[in-house]
Amino acid sequence: MKNINTILIANRGEIASRVIRTCRKMGIKSIAVFSEADRSAPFVEQADAAVFIGESSPAASYLDQNKIINVAKKMGANAIHPGYGFLSENVGFAKRCAAEGLIFIGPNPNAIDAMGSKSKAKSLMKKHKVPVVPGYQGKDQSIARLTKEAIKMGFPVLLKATAGGGGKGMRIVHEAAGIEKAIEAAKRESLSAFGDDELIVEKYIASGRHIEFQIFGDQHGNAIHILERECSIQRRYQKVIEESPSPVMDEKLRTKMGKAAVDAAKALDYDNAGTVEFIYDDKSGDFYFLEVNTRLQVEHPVTEEVTGLDLVQMQIESAQGLPLSVTQADIKGTGYAIEARLYAEDASNDFLPVTGTIQRFEYPAVDGLRVETAIKSGSEISVFYDPMIAKIIVHDVTRSGAMRKMQYVLRNLICQGMTTNQDFLLHLMENDDFQAGNYNTHFIANKIDLNAIAKKSVEDHALAGIAATLHGWQQREKLRTLLRAIPSGWRNNFYAPQSEDYQMGEADLKVRYRSQNKQQFDFYVGDATYATSLIIADDQIIRAEIDGIQYGFNISQNGNDYFVHNENIGNIALTQKERFPVKEAEKIAGGYETPMPSQIIKVLVKEGQEVKSGEGLVILSSMKMENTIEAVEDGVVEAVYATEGSNVEAGFLLLKLETTA
Ligand code: ADP
Ligand code: ADP
Ligand code: MG
């Protein structure tokens, strides 16, 4: 047995943090490597030592084998954990580690190599009687041969790049017409994306569910499976939600699929953590091998939550040459776990990744909640890496209990500063079919109206507008208190209706309001009036009572951009339009009205009189306070309707001013 006492983590983000946690638990020193962009990332701080390895582009840092090996040696590491992605399935790197006397925490290089190509993998599995998707994975890669095989198999077929991964390099073909063109295009894409144009042709399973088994092996020939995870909820062939156990699993199927997974592991002399992915045909109940991922999987926490095992610790132990500490008979799942991946991406815009700064990241304390994240408030989501912000995992005794918790977390989680898929994830969780476990890999495409998620009600927009306006107002108030010399905005315009204009995606939102004092406001949005009391206002929270209901709004502001979140509304982003041009236009059109029921104390101007901006026009009294309505621009008094001593309603037109622009 080789003792591991110092591990270099050749990765970043949440998975680096995850590995560091287990290192600490085991008394192993952890060494992080980091790129320019990650200098102040949490994982860098968490590691026992951290070494800069280069520019932000992966090629210059996390994929630079020389740099990583050199740092490992210099820092006295005797093992390297590759995480997932980057060098984790790079057979050259695994071999190089061994040659340099460093333990690669993963399976042996032969296993990685055997599973590195989808065609080699399928051929090997077929040989070992693991059911594979019917298809062609041969040496003859001529267009004619591939076409012939596709037609023989019957449509639809799936063309896959043998070197592909991460959901990339796949193409469905529905009919014989155009198959040659599709093959040519798939080859071109594959060559440019993976440097290899080899394809396999597979029967496309129209109603498939992605069910995968966690496998584990040691260097003593033991191999087990650690139950399944279902990962059918995908977009672009990539997982967004994973759960265990699978809603379609029963003991009989588990035994059968589990055996196939262990057979796959044995075929590879598998000696660390891996995942055997299957596609399960909903219609026939048959299942087929897809691939083996020879690394720790993104969704491994789901398995950890139902089994109580620490898969990273098990990886380290296997890499040290220790025999597995558990047998197949020991593996028992308890309860139910589900993971949702929070991404910086726009579900309503084809799931395009977005970049920006996470201004605020907080989540509620819920029993059974585990959050794996790469970020903290202030972290940047950059163009260089995966836009995953966090993995949210909940565990409960029952599936419905876990789903309820997940919904609660997704409602109350605060992640502001950019568009995320938070509302989308909640929408998925609330779907009846999803809750019934009734779904396949087409669920998002077929059952979810992506445009509906971003669409909020008129009422929700109004509430978000009120929250943003109160926030802006409060920020100005604070500034005014700091700089006492500046005259009060609200006092000066005590009766003048204020107006803020926002842009929400394509839509405009006009919010008008009058403040009676620092707590009481009347808001006018669209045709509705909202009587509003401000309860709490700080830099991140607006708590307000609006028509008798109290709301807590989480607010982040970045220049003119406001991000408003409330557990019932979800996330709404508003951009404030430039105040002044809009303001002026409105004032000219407006005239001067009473903001609330008042007595007219004094009229200070006459028709035809020239006035300057800021000059008093009318003195009003209401709620025992006297206030002066002032001109907001230079002009000539066109008409006066106010008579001294009279009592008027709110909205009474006092006078009109013609601008002298
Ligand atoms: P998994 O297959 O573990 O569930 P995905 O399917 O989401 O993971 O990821 C697809 C591929 O992209 C995998 O090879 C994974 O290693 C890689 N990948 C995912 N996220 C990241 C990341 N943050 N950094 C680097 N590689 C990643
Ligand atoms: P990757 O290496 O990109 O993860 P996989 O072979 O694991 O590629 O496939 C990714 C996803 O594509 C699967 O989870 C499944 O949703 C879909 N898929 C793959 N093969 C088939 C198939 N033969 N029929 C239907 N869907 C498939
Ligand atoms: Mg896969």
Image (spheres, rainbow, N blue to C red):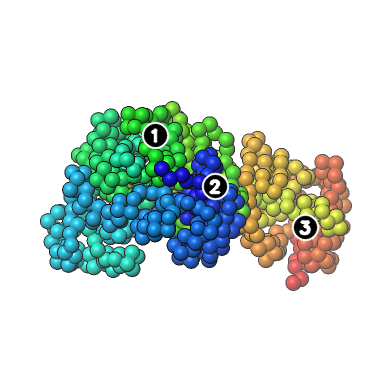
Residue type, numbered disc 3: Leu
Q: Position of residue 141 (x, y in %)?
A: 19, 65
Residue type, numbered disc 1: Ser
Q: Residue at x 44, y 62 (%)?
A: 65
Residue contact at pointers 2 and 3, CB within 8 angstroms: no
Find the distance from the CA under tag 2 to the CA under tag 3.
Answer: 77 Å
- Callout 3: 10 Å neighbours few (<14), some, many (20+)? many
Secondary element under disc 2, as helix, strand or loop, is strand
Find the distance from the CA under tag 2 to the CA under tag 1.
Answer: 22 Å
- Work out whether 90 lies above or below 434: below
Q: As drawn, is 622 to the left or to the right of 540?
A: right
Q: Toward the viewer: 411 or 528? A: 411
Q: As drawn, is 413 to the left or to the right of 404?
A: right
Does the beta carbon of the residue at mark 3 sit less than 8 Å from ligand 1? no
- Disc 2 or 1, which lies upstream in sequence? 2
Secondary element under disc 3, as helix, strand or loop, is strand
Residue contact at pointers 2 and 1, CB within 8 angstroms: no
Mark whose residue sits in front, 2 or 3: 2
- Disc 1 or 3, which lies upstream in sequence? 1
Q: Indicate the quadrant containing the N terminus: top left, top right, bottom left or bottom right.
A: top left
Q: Which residue is labeled 3 in the image? A: 655
Q: Which residue is labeled 2 in the image? A: 29
Q: Position of residue 473 (x, y in %)?
A: 72, 51
